[in-house]
Amino acid sequence: MRPKQHETTGSGDLFRARLDQIINLKHELVQLAGRIDWEWIDGEIAPLYSDQGRPGIATRFVIGLLLPKHIYGLSDEGVCERWVHDPYFQYFTGEEFFQHEFPHERSDLSHWRKRLGDKLELLLAESLRVAHASGALRTRDLARVTVDTTVQPKNITFPTDAKLLHAAIKGLNRLAVTHGVRLRQSYLRIAKHAAMMAGRYAHAKQFNRHRRQLRLLRTRLGRIIRDIRRKIAGQAELEQAFTWPLARASQIRSQQQRQRGWKLYSFHAPEVECIGKGKASAPYEFGVKVSVVTTNARAPGGQFVLHAKALQNPAQYLRGGS
């Protein structure tokens, strides 16, 4: 359900002092909080919520955490911990009185980002509007811009054959349980042990034993793929739900370590690519190529990011799910 509108009482409390009475109103976060159009952002996000269910977290609270998180370079856990003892963070999220406990779960930030998806560009658009209105970014500063690409690393482990095969087995089992497909055997315990031993044998340079464990994982994954296909045959809804996962699992099962051409590097994130950066410390990075547009000359408020977009290859993405 759509979160409730943020409301303030505007009145004092006999036992607590209001935040605006104990903080410096010239602080950067206080000034920024007064310039952001919170109602406009809330209206843009409203279509993403249904009319049923439990009310979501207030938009201002979540955005008030995400912006300082990036301003001060904090993690999700770090921004939640700092919110508890920093009155300026609490004021920025719309609190009237100082709170001694964080009112939500840290994982709510991750869930909120997944719900928004591409709508996170609203924060960039609003920040540019505020910068232009305050004079930190002028119109003539946008006459020339710099466009560059970089790699946005994805939150995945280093993709070895054993890890990918194990992830595919776990992913198919998880999906089968979700859709009520009863498998003859899950192979979860066997796959976990085989993946662990494959890593140990590779580290010890016992490659014959390492390859034996990989064959075991490929065999078990093939059995699960064939078992699911038999169980869902003729059921259009299940066939549609399993089309992409089965295609990814088949790709992982068939690909080899040093093969040429397109490869799948993550079962749950098929958009991940292996990109060579030429760095001595990390010659290859696993992620998505990202285009970033910045101002060319330094504006009064510094350099600004004007646009950012992930450049996923549609052909490769479709081949990963075909």
Image (cartoon, grey):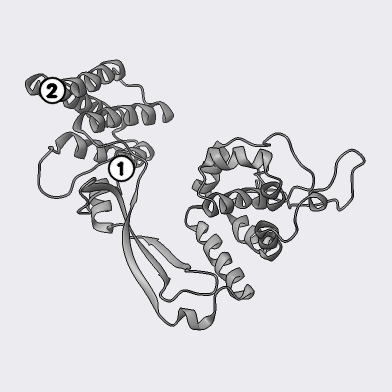
Q: Residue furthest left?
A: 208
User: Where residue 304 appears, x then y in whole percent?
Assistant: 48, 68
Taking the spot 72% from the left edge, 49% from the top edge, the residue there is 4
Image quarter of residue 234: top left
Instruction: From this view, report whether residue 284 is shown above or below residue 173.
Output: below
Looking at the rendered structure, the kind of residue marked 2 is His
Quarter residue 296 falls in: bottom left
Drawn side of residue 165 relative to residue 261, left or right: right
Q: Which mark is on residue 19? A: none
Do the CB atoms of the residues marked 2 and 1 lie less than 8 Å apart? no
Q: Which residue is mark 2?
A: 210
Q: Can you tell which of label 2 and label 1 is closer to the viewer?
A: 2
Secondary element under disc 1, as helix, strand or loop, is helix
Give me the C-alpha separation between circle 2 and circle 1. Answer: 29 Å
Front-lying residue, 153 or 281: 281
Q: Where residue 151 sits: x, y (%)?
A: 31, 54
Q: Position of residue 39 (x, y in %)?
A: 69, 61
Say what amino acid the circle numbered 1 marks: Trp
Q: Residues within 10 Å of mark 1 (few under 14, many from 20)?
A: some
Residue under numbered circle 1: 244
Q: Is residue 319 above or below residue 131?
A: above
Image side of residue 18 versus residue 56, left or right: right
Q: Is residue 312 visible?
A: yes
Seen as rendered, the residue at the extreme right is 14
| Quadrant of the drawing holding the N terminus | top right
